Image (spheres, rainbow, N blue to C red):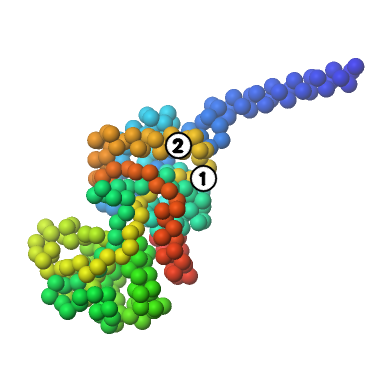
Amino acid sequence: MKKIGWLFIAMIAVLIIAGCGSSDGEASGGGEGTPDKLVMGFVPSQDSDTIADTVKPLADKLAEKLGVEVEGKVMTNYTALVEAMGTNEVQIGFIPAFAYVLANEKHDVEVILKSERYGSGTYKAQYLVRSDSDIKNLEDLEGKVWAYGDPTSTSGYLFPAAQIMDEFNVENPETDFFSNSIQTGGHDNSAIAVYNGEADVATTFDDVRTELEEEYPDIMDKLSVLTYTSEIPNDTISVTSELNDEFVQKIKDTFLGFNEEEEMIKIMNDVYSWDAIIEAEDSEYDVVRDTYEKFSDSISINDL
């Protein structure tokens, strides 16, 4: 009887401890995968001194809807953002297609939404040439000078380079197809290089010329679009794998609801030129994975 009595007391103690543990878990954020605080990571596409203030109303509204504290954090670059998501320091990341593919591969980051611009969830890279040049098709680019912004840019380099590699059976477009290449540091600089006659072709997002018209009023006439690459899925809103499915769905629904709130969409437009927020699937980014495979030996997360 004494053994049974002690066993009964031990069982009661275990139940009490388990109950206390459950209460503590609920107090610390509603169970595994639901934090007390969310951090949203942004990489500036504009002045980094102003972006934090710009996104604060978005963070505040998200906090109101989700019932947890939300902080908008400005990151120095996409490498820092992806790695912060890998260590769960950042739970929501605004990351472009190529960075998402690497984040998904290394840290199991999941895309839940993407941007819509001009009524589309995809965009293309374009080849810009001088309108008065003798370049009429991709074949005519052989032996010419190529201007691109950055070798990790999806539209500025990766997709055009992959297209040249496939269509002309070359391993390195910079050395095996073009006579020379210029890394300009940005899409706008690439277009200006062609405008100024420093390069024969520039690969940029569609249509970078509209952002240069104020400084170069005749750029739409001086530069023409030779052709485009295949479609590229737009940049993403992605989340870490530590968040549970129910909470992720709540985040997703909240962001989609912002389409009905003019102030929220204006913030997204001011920060990243998003016109709307739409749903996204991981499979949409397979085309980016396929392109990345051609460059996986030379490009990593540290190059973002």
Q: Is residue 208 left or right of residue 303?
A: left
Q: Residue 227 location in percent, x, y?
A: 24, 68
Circle 1/circle 2 CB separation < 8 Å: no
| Residue at screen point 51% across, 38% down | 245
Q: Amino acid at mark 1?
A: Ser
Q: Residue 233 location in percent, x, y?
A: 35, 55
Label 1: element kind? loop
Q: Nearer the viewer, residue 8 or 269?
A: 269
Give the mark, 1 or 2, whose residue is nearer the N terminus: 1
Marking on residue 249: 2
Q: Badge 2: few (under 14), some or many (20 or more) residues near its Cα, within 10 Å? A: few
| Residue at screen point 48% across, 45% down | 240
Q: Residue 165 location in percent, x, y?
A: 38, 74
Task: For marks 1 and 2, give the one nearer the viewer.
Answer: 2
Q: Badge 1: few (under 14), some or many (20 or more) residues near its Cα, within 10 Å? A: some
Total numbered circles: 2
Which quarter of the rendering shows the C terminus? bottom left
Q: Nearer the viewer, residue 136 or 128?
A: 136
Q: Nearer the viewer, residue 136 or 205?
A: 136
Q: Amino acid at mark 2?
A: Gln
Task: State whether residue 4 appears in this view.
Answer: yes
- Residue 157's image quarter? bottom left
Task: State whether residue 84 appears in this view.
Answer: no
